[in-house]
Image: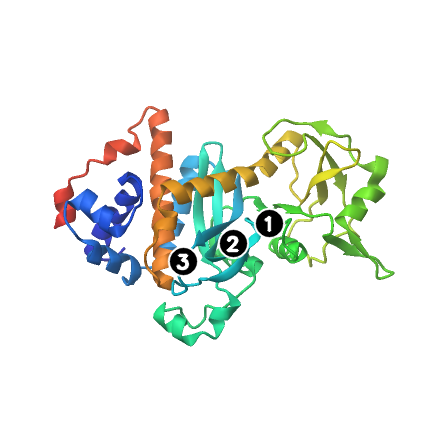
Amino acid sequence: MSRADQRRWGEVYVRGLVEVPGRKSVRRISEWLLGRRADQSLQQFVNQSPWDWQPVRERIVEMVDAKLAPRAWVVGEVVLPKSGRNSVGVDQQFSQTLGRVLNCQLGLAVSAIGSAGTVPVNWRLMLPRSWDTDHERRARSRVPDEERHRSRWQHLFDALDEMTIAWCAKPLPVVVDASRSPSAVALIRGLENRGLRYVVRVNCATPLARLASGEVVTVGERLAWAGSARGPAQHWRGGLGHGSRYSTILMPDSMVTGAVRSVGLPRRTRKVVVGWGAGPDRVESAWVTNVESTRFSDLLELLALCSRAGRDLQRLGELSGLCHFEGRSFRGWHHHVTLVSAAHAYGLLGRLRGADGGPSASDGAAVDQIECQR
């Protein structure tokens, strides 16, 4: 942040997200940390101040990569219920996570996850289609002209391109639950075209290929055809929350999702990892992946990261103030979620330092408040 007042209020807001118990409103943050009402200044910093959130996120990625040693980027939907209709991006929307329609904002978070925890490092606000032509609400929420309704995976590709190209972040396997999405094929195609490793949960109706006859082959049909050709089922108790027997089925090169392999990108073996239920040949889960691993347990651990990151995001909403944003602007939403990521990363990395014998995050919590009051 280029200005001293931005850095000052940024510190106050992040410390409030870390230290203030309960609801982390700007009024409670200012009274708790400064002992006086400064909510107008904090509101201005979050909702109107022109600081760019992208370099902040880039710095978070650098610190998390260095200290957390993340194993994957896990993609998750963030549901922020709202009572009114004026906050940016609010509408009656279907949440794939909850499986129902509600009045809410829908965000997309890309989180870096390692053995010690999860940190959301990049965000997208998914505008409903109704906001494209609602000029009054767009003007009131100061939505940029170029921001329009886009598909979930277009938002994801934009975020991944920003991370790998603009920020030069080291690409990690992308783990996504697309089992409730009708466009899982488009997701896999986009990841393949970018040369990224992926583990994508799909449903049995997801098409894998179109045969010369024009017939579409689905995941379920591929599993049925495999029969005894599938790999032997292995038992694993890694906390996936469903069937404990897993096996893999290789996908021949002719059975790809229509991805066009760009020149210079490596050709990877694609396979389906199947979680089997209690009944005979009952499929509990199916994951399409191009991750090459020498140990099957390593691949299963990547699958488990998806559900773990979902639980971590839910706790983030409850404990780090993610759901407590009071502004209505597009800029304010991105400022808020970015500072929530910073606060969460501060706490997690501080705990890691404490575990290693270094100073913990709480050691820095007693920064002199007089400078903030100035």
The part of the image, by quadrant, that contains residue 139 is bottom left
* Residue sitting at x 45%, y 74%: 134
**Disc 2 residue type (three-letter):** Leu
**In the image, is residue 173 above or below residue 297?**
below
Q: Of discs 3 and 1, which sits in the foreground? A: 3
Packing grade of label 1 (10 A; few <14, some 14-19, many >=20) is: many
Q: Earlier in the sequence, mark 1 or mark 2?
A: 2
> Mark 2–mark 3 contact, CB under 8 Å?
no
Q: How is the image coloured?
A: rainbow
From the viewer's perspective, tell me whether residue 205 is left or right of residue 201: right
Separation (CA) of disc 3 from disc 1: 39 Å
**In the image, is residue 78 above or below residue 291?**
below
Residue 41 pos. (x, y %): 20, 57
Packing grade of label 3 (10 A; few <14, some 14-19, many >=20) is: few
Residue 317 pos. (x, y %): 41, 45
**Residue highlighted by disc 2:** 160
**Residue highlighted by disc 3:** 83
**Residue highlighted by disc 1:** 196
